[in-house]
Image (cartoon, grey):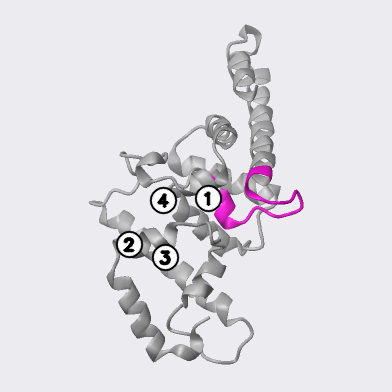
Amino acid sequence: MIAQLCKTLSNTPFVKNSEISYNLKINLRLIIIRQAYETCKKWSTKSPDDPILLRGFWLFMGRNNSDHFRIIKYFTEKNVFEGLDYNHFRTLFKKICIERDVDVKVWAVSRIDKATKRTILETERLKPEQTDDGASSCNDESDEEEKERIRSILKDSFDDCRRWLHGDSKEPLADNIGLSGFCCYMDLSRNDTILNDFFENNLDACERMADNYSKDQGHQR
């Protein structure tokens, strides 16, 4: 219905190339983003009163690796790990659209449409080539500047996770992050396949984790 409304408005002669047309487009964009917010809440949470968490928002946006970095950075900078309200949802949604160079209305409609066609569990199981990033990945491996930006974001997130797990403790920050602590920070559930996929493709990771744990058992959570 929303997609049809967009099409109808864009093809209506009397609202083309006018101030009315501009206002209608702005209002329509806000309406669609609001609809995307309500859809995301129903789709990614168990109760209407539950907030939209990082994991749920990322999956609603399509489980794209490129979006994941942007989302983590926003949650970290704004300190909204307790969940997104409508204002934060709208701001982050528009930010992602700008960085993706896509139209906000079109992207919002596509997110709503995808949410009606697949569940959150089905989205969790998407392979990278099945996401919007697809074959034309937004992360160009030959672009050193982009890779450095990603490393910086990951480092910030790593440090934020250490501080989050540290809480009010007077002990020094732990050098390593335990598996359970990482899962809590990332809001991963037993249905997530990310860790299994990671360990299958990075067999040395288990050895490194075991070695880190043996050296720093007291800081693992």
Report which residue position mark 4 lands on: 65
Q: Tags 3 and 4 in contact by the CB under 8 Å rule?
A: no
Report which residue position mark 1 lands on: 58
Q: Is residue 59 above or below residue 21?
A: below
Q: Is residue 155 above or below residue 39?
A: below
Q: Is residue 110 above or below residue 77?
A: above
Query: Bounds of the magenta span?
Result: 42-59
Front disc: 2 or 1: 2
Element class at badge 3:
helix
Cα separation, mark 1 vs mark 4, equals: 9 Å
Cα separation, mark 2 vs mark 1, equals: 23 Å
Cα separation, mark 1 vs mark 3, equals: 16 Å
Cα separation, mark 4 vs mark 2, equals: 18 Å
Q: Is residue 71 magenta?
A: no
Tell me the kind of residue under disc 1: Trp
Front disc: 2 or 3: 2
Viewer-nearest residue: 18 or 34? 34
Front disc: 3 or 4: 4
Q: Residue at x 53, y 56 (%)?
A: 191
Front disc: 1 or 3: 1
